[in-house]
Image (tube, rainbow, N blue to C red):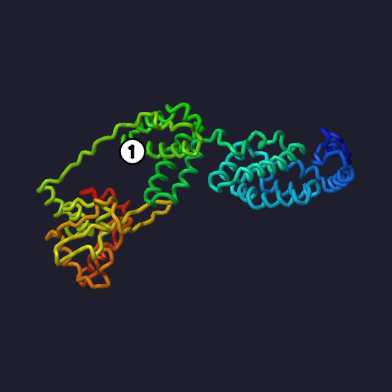
Amino acid sequence: MTNVAGHLREQNGMYQMILSWKDTNGKRRTKSISTGLPVKGNKKRAESLLRQTQKEFNPETMQQVSDLSVPEYLTRWLRESVMNLSPDTYGRYAYDMGRVIIPYFEQKRLSLKALSPRDLETFFRYERQQEEASVQQLLDWHKELTDALQYAVDSNWLKTNPVKTVDPCLDNSPVLFTDFLMDWLKMMKSRVEITTYAGYTGSITKRIVPYFKQFNYTLQDLEQHPKYIQDFYQHELDRGLSANTVIHYHANIRKCLQYAFQIGMIRSNPADRVERPRKEKFKSEVYNAEELEQLFTAIQGDPAEFGVIMAAFYGLRRSEIVGLKWDAIDFENKKISIQHTVVTAKVNGTVTEIARDKTKTKSSRRTLPLIPACEQMLNNWVTVTSAQQATFIHIWISPVRYLLPMPSSGSSQRRQKCENEPDAGDKKEKQPKILRF
């Protein structure tokens, strides 16, 4: 066991512990550790703390303190500061550390030596915006972190105290645009429909963040230089993306920056000062009568036949075709009601199928005449019972998105054919696209 000598020293009105020992090479080493005790009236407490520190001091482990995670260090500091704080102060510190500060940093996996002012600014920002902490709470936590990290500085585990330059009540510190964008995306998950959130996620995580991450632009950088956003749009256009796709990216960026403006992190929205691409007008190509005849001949007997016919005659969206239920078919009055939809959304890597009793827009909820071709096909499939009225006409909607008839006596061969269909990826090159719906 290493023999550790020690004595007290007065510095700036406080007691300092000076420890001395020889390392494995026989070289004398010293370390100064603050007691946190004022000189006046605390000599006996300082001497007691010195004896305890000499007894527990291990040069090898003490040199590795900076490698501890922030929660581990804060827990250790609480344990070692119990003699230096009054019972009331220690109780308040321990409560705040255990309830707020340590749980937050447990999710960040930061070491003490890696802790930066920006990490601490992010902590205070989170508590202000997400947890709605009061000004007094923020100031209390700032004082507690200051004391805890100053102990690391006094012990030579940190060179400077990273929290001293942080104002816990203001958002005047630089924030990486990509970090703020991802935080905004998490917030939007509970505020928009899952399909909208899936669209945001795809654009932000696959295109916007990878581009901006390489530059480390802050919100303030974008506010001062809107051209950085314009450069991104041009980069995507040069890659061959359509103007309409880039407009979608612009909508995400603008909405995110508008939120940053609303909460006071920037003084204006830089996305309002860039030139977004001009929207490309959609040019539709309509099948003529001869092409439709060829299409119906080619699709006859295919599991997707009903879907193709509905798309060709009614111009329905794919979600509306897949969302058709038997109770939407009024054979007596020869009508079809468009009121249900089924869509897919990829969230966190998982494709989710979402059935909704509503259409994309209010005007999309409509009633259409039941044409003889569709009526005959439906009548040939099945006699609908009352128990089937609320069921979908199709059997599955992914991955091939084929619409299948309800089971009937004459459909076993067709069902067997459908069950043996290859995956969509296997069929991509074998089946040309005849109609997109």
Instruction: Please name the residue shown 14% across and 67% down the image.
Output: 332
Return the residue nearer the eye: 122 or 22: 122
| Quadrant hosting residue 276 | top left
Would residue 321 appear left or right of 16 to someone viewing this image? left
Q: Nearer the viewer, residue 124 or 19?
A: 124
Give the percent coordinates (x, y) of residue 200: 40, 44
* Image-based side of 142 in relation to 311, left or right: right
Residue depicted at x 76% and y 45%: 61
What residue does disc 1 label?
245
Q: Quadrant of residue 12?
A: top right
From this viewpoint, which residue is outermost toward the left?
Answer: 290
Residue found at x 67% / y 35%: 164
Badge 1 local density, few (<14 within 10 Å), some, or many (20+)? Answer: some
- Residue 22 visible in rendering: no
Q: 117 or 72: nearer the eye?
A: 117
Residue located at (49% from left, 33% from top): 266
- Closer to us: 69 or 177: 177
Q: Position of residue 251 (x, y in %)?
A: 37, 38
Residue 58 appears in the figure: yes
Tell how many labels. 1
The x, y position of residue 64, in whole percent, is 73, 42
Q: Secondary structure at mark 1?
A: helix
Q: Amino acid at mark 1?
A: Thr
User: Residue 291: x and y, percent?
Assistant: 13, 47
Looking at the image, residue 388 sits to the left or right of residue 298; the answer is right
